[in-house]
Amino acid sequence: NYQYIVDYLIEPALALLPSGNRRDFLSDYLRALSVPSVIAQSEKKDNKGDVIMAVSEHERNLLTGFWEKHKPLILAALYAISSDPNQDQELRDDADKIVRSGSKDFSTFAVLFDGKVVRRQVKKTALGREIANVLIESGITAEQFIQLKSDRSSSFSLLKTVAEITAAEKEYNRYRESKESPVVFDGTEYYVSGNWGDNNIPKLQDFLKKHFSMIKLEKEHAQ
C-alpha cells in the first residue's frame, strides 16, 4: 500500500538524496499523499469522506503528539456526538466506536521464550524493550538484530541510537531516552520505541511469529 511505499522507499530515498530536483519532487509527492482527498460517492450515494493515503514519519509524530496532548478533550467531544440524538445515527455509531477504542486498557503482558515465562507484568510501553532484552540475552546474531531493529510495528523503528532519534521523536519522547536506560548490543546503546497500543500489539505479535517464533506474548490482566 501507499504507507508501505512511504516507509520503505520514499523516506529512505529522501534520506540519501542530496538537495535538488529529485529530492524536491519526492518531498512534494510525499506531502500530496497526506492531503485528504474526497472519494467519489458510490452507486448507493454513500459519502465515504476524506481519505489520507499515507503520512510521513514527521507528520505521524505531529499527529500522534496532538492526539496524546488533547486526547481527553477529543474523546469528550466524540462522546457528546455519540450521545446526541440530533446527530446522524451512522455518525453517532462511528463516534462511539472511537470512544470505546480510545479508552485506556492497563492490561500487562507476560513474555515467553521457548514456551517458558521470562518476564511478567510488562506494561505496553515496555514491551519492545523487554522483547529486545530477552532476544539479546538469548544471543541473537547481528543479522537477526538488524531485523529486530527495523521492525515498525509501533509505527516507528523499534530501536534507534541517540544519533538516529529525530528532533520530533525527542520532543514527543517516542524513545523515552530521558527516562529509560538503553539496551546494548555489540557495545552500542539503543533506545526502544514506547509507542504501543491495542492496534500496534497484534502487528508486533505477527512480526514475532514470522521472525522470532521463540518469543510469544500473553495478555495478563488489567491493573
Image: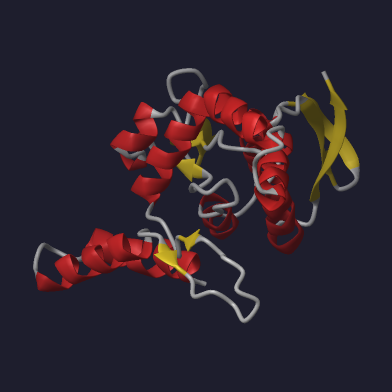
Image quadrant assignment for residue 178: top left
Q: Residue furthest right?
A: 115
- From the top left corner, tell me how far across and down residue 58 is, in percent: 34, 46
Determine whether, in the image, residue 25 is placed left or right of residue 151. Answer: left
Q: Residue at x 43, y 41 (%)?
A: 63
Decide: is 18 above or below 42.
Answer: above
Which of the colour schemes (rainbow, by chain, secondary structure, one colour) is used?
secondary structure
| Identity of the residue furthest to the left in this view | 20
Position of the C terminus by quadrant = top right
155 lies above or below 62 = below
Q: Tell me which residue sits at (51%, 22%) in the image.
A: 181
Q: What residue is shown at x 36% (from left), y 65% (from top)?
A: 33
* Horizontal side of residue 33 vs 152, given as left or right: left
| Residue 43 in picture, x, y percent from top left | 62, 81
Q: Quadrant of residue 47?
A: bottom right
Q: At which x and y percent is residue 176? A: 48, 26
* Residue depicted at 28% across the width and 69% down the height: 29
* x, y percent for residue 188: 43, 38
Query: Closer to the camera, 80 or 57?
Result: 80
Can residue 182 be seen at all in this image of the molecule?
no
16 to 198, vertically: above or below? below
Observer-nearest of 74 and 54 = 74
Front residue of 91 and 158: 91
